[in-house]
Image (spheres, rainbow, N blue to C red):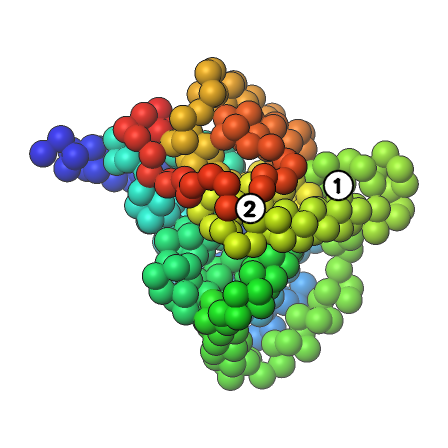
Amino acid sequence: MSRVWRIFAAVVLTLIGVGILTAFGSRTNANDFVEYWSAGKLFVHGANPYSGPLILALEKSRGFAPDSPLIMLNPPWTLALVAPLGFLPALGALVLWIVAGAGCIVASLVLLDVPPKNRTLAFLFAPVLGSFAMEQSSPFLLLGFSLFLRFHRSRPFLAGASLLLMAIKPHLFMVFWVILLADSIYRRRLTILAGFASSLACVSALVTLVHPHVWKDYFALLHESTLDQNAYPTLPSLLRATVNVNLAWIATIPLCLAIAWGIAYYWRRRSSWDWKQEGMLVMMVAVLTSPYCWISDEVVLLPSVASALSSSPRRFSMEILTAINFAGVVGICITIRSLAWLPLALFLWYLYAARTAIGMRPEGNGSTTSLSGDADSLR
């Protein structure tokens, strides 16, 4: 009975949080939800979902203050995700969006076998709060990664299909994609890749059927985009600003180094590779070195944090994580652009708490760590 009450409390707290965030979001009119709603609205009505003037007109109708539109830069297959928003008025779509995001978090915690009594605490994780504050699509990334971790051995095709959710922002996971390809080739098991390719092809075909010119419109948007000129709260972006802000390629140097490390890391452990263990560090490195990343996207680090806390973490691990998390929440309240330090702090904490070395452990040494751990994980 106590477990039922804990789950009930989690649902109640989630719904309360959803109500507060919905009320807050309906007044801001400038968070990222407005771009998803506008794109979905244009898409379901047969208009160009990447058209700046059309999007700005819709956003202005919702009270959007800036004079330049907030355009969804995600690939066209993402339109299948935001299309349901287009059938609803802005406030109704916002409620659906936040509830869906909260549902992704809850589902991910269940998939990761985090103990029920501790699942509510995951909503206090700074990137989770950041994803709700920004009304971002990041919880869907977490759900995709959690589904992959849960089913990559038992149902590889389904695990591959779930990667479609991570493909909403494919640039965040370059290290992950490279290692996944290497592992599939080495083991001569292409089922995961087949599942991913199938889901990507089916959704892309559906989107193209609804809007035949969507790919042309998307690439035209990318051609005109100033994405590579923007500043992001990431270490690669800080490196670029320090060396030469006009040289966008400088921000890709950490990513290239991370990919090289990832290949070497995988090769040393290839015979005993387990995504539930080695994948946690891989995701930490992927987010740390991504040139384009916001605190909301760091929600995909929740499995890594849960894993570290469930594997006999070192002394003061929880206290240190609490301090990092508190500083992150304060940063969200002040300005999200000040949080470039957070991925590095979480990365260093993970190395300490999980007793993990960035160097190479001899292959075959060590056992797989479960994400469920004991009853004290995430306490």
- Residue 326, numbered label: none
| Residue 361 located left or right of residue 210 | right
The amino acid type found where label 2 is placed reads Glu
x, y percent for residue 4: 15, 37
Under circle 1, the secondary element is helix
Is 302 located above or below residue 39 in the figure?
above
Task: Tell me what residue is drawn at x 60 percent, y 57 percent.
Answer: 179
Label 1: how many residues lie within 10 Å, few (<14), some (14-19) or many (20+)? many
| Residue 175 located left or right of residue 200 | right
Is 239 located above or below residue 68 in the figure?
above
Disc 2 from disc 1: Cα separation: 31 Å
Count the labels in the image: 2
Task: Tell me what residue is drawn at x 38 percent, y 32 percent.
Answer: 310
Foreground residue among 57 and 199: 199
x, y percent for residue 367: 43, 41
Task: Tell me what residue is drawn at x 87 percent, y 42 percent.
Answer: 245
- Taking the image as drawn, is residue 157 in sight? yes
Closer to the chain start, of discs 2 and 1, is 1
| Residue 316 located left or right of residue 335 | left
The amino acid type found where label 1 is placed reads Pro
Please say if the residues under marks 2 and 1 sit with CB atoms less than 8 Å apart. Answer: no
x, y percent for residue 323: 52, 18
Q: Which residue is mark 1?
A: 236
Foreground residue among 341 and 369: 369
Is 15 located above or below residue 157 in the figure?
above
Under circle 2, the secondary element is loop
x, y percent for residue 193: 51, 69
- Image quarter in which the C terminus is found: top left
Q: Which residue is mark 2?
A: 363
